Image: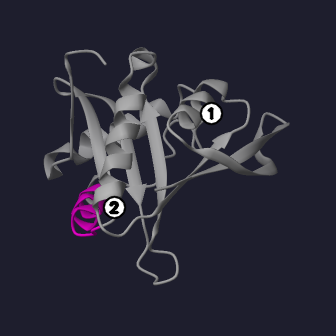
């Protein structure tokens, strides 16, 4: 990973930067579940989300920072229901100009370590497009297994794409 990159949890003053990052990267690739300017939270809602995540023992958001610029974001979201709170849903995105520098792997390792040590999470799940070969290889290197395939889940310009559901038992 590039020496200038630091990984940290967000502060409330990062909310606008986070919203802008997600809205920007949505237009950089078709592999995300959202397009440019489709991030569902505004700045105030993002601040509430930061507080909510900090107060949940099995949720985390990590920012990969290059100075004041967000290079990538990784998240684990877990619910409160007794039967499913052991499972964390992983999300990760690295801005195109920072890809290939080990940032995604570092974020993933930090997220996995958080889950191993939070006393709640025993399983991590993620979804990724089957044709996102770079991501699939990274996830498999980190121990994730393909658990299923969801056909025709994503529709882009008239073409359907399948998703893998991948999981990691801790």
Residue 24 versus residue 54: which sits nearer the camera?
Answer: 54
Which disc number belongs to residue 151?
none
Q: Position of residue 113 (x, y in %)?
A: 32, 48
Mark positioned earlier in the residue sequence (2 or 1): 2
For the record, the magenta segment spans 45-57
The quarter holding residue 52 reads: bottom left
Choose top left, top right, bottom left or bottom right for residue 53.
Answer: bottom left
Q: Residue at 70% x, 46% y: name it.
A: 164
Residue at the farthest bottom position: 82
146, above or below 122, in the image: above
**How far from the left and from the top, in percent, is residue 57?**
27, 68
Residue 79 seen in the figure? yes
Residue drawn at x 15%, y 49% is: 11
Looking at the rendered image, the quarter that the N terminus falls into is top left
Q: Would you call the spot at circle 1 few (<14 residues within 10 Å), some (14-19), or many (20 or more)? A: many
Relative horizontal placement of residue 37, taking residue 17 as reference (left or right): right
Which residue corresponds to the image point at 21% horizontal and 47% vertical from the top-left?
Answer: 10
The vertical placement of 137 against 144, above or below, is: above
Spot occupied by residue 152 in the image (x, y as percentages of width and height): 83, 47
Is residue 73 visible to us here?
A: no
Residue, disc 1: 136
Is residue 160 left or right of 22 when viewed as pictured? right
Q: Quadrant of residue 63?
A: top left
- Residue that label 2 marks: 59
Is residue 154 positioned above or below 46 on the image? above
Query: Which secondary structure type mostly characterizes the magenta part of the structure?
Result: helix
Q: Is residue 147 magenta?
A: no
| Element on which disc 1 rests | helix
Left or right placement of residue 9 versus residue 135 in this view: left
Q: Position of residue 34 (x, y in %)?
A: 57, 43
Q: Secondary structure at mark 2?
A: loop
């Amino acid at each position: 990973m590039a020496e200038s990159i630091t990984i940290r949890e967000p502060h409330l003053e990062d909310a606008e930067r986070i919203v802008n990052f997600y809205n920007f990267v949505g237009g950089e690739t078709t592999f995300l579940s959202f397009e440019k300017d489709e991030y569902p939270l505004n700045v105030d809602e993002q601040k509430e989300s930061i507080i909510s995540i900090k107060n949940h023992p099995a949720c985390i958001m990590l920012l990969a920072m290059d100075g004041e610029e967000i290079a990538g974001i990784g998240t684990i979201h877990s619910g409160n229901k007794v039967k499913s709170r052991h499972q964390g849903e992983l999300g990760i995105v690295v801005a195109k100009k920072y890809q290939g520098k080990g940032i995604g792997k570092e974020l993933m390792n930090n997220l996995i370590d958080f889950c191993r040590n939070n006393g709640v999470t025993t399983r991590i799940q993620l979804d990724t497009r089957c044709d996102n070969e770079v991501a699939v290889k990274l996830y498999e290197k980190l121990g994730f297994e393909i658990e299923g395939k969801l056909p025709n889940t994503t529709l882009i310009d008239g073409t359907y794409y399948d998703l893998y559901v991948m999981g990691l038992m801790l």
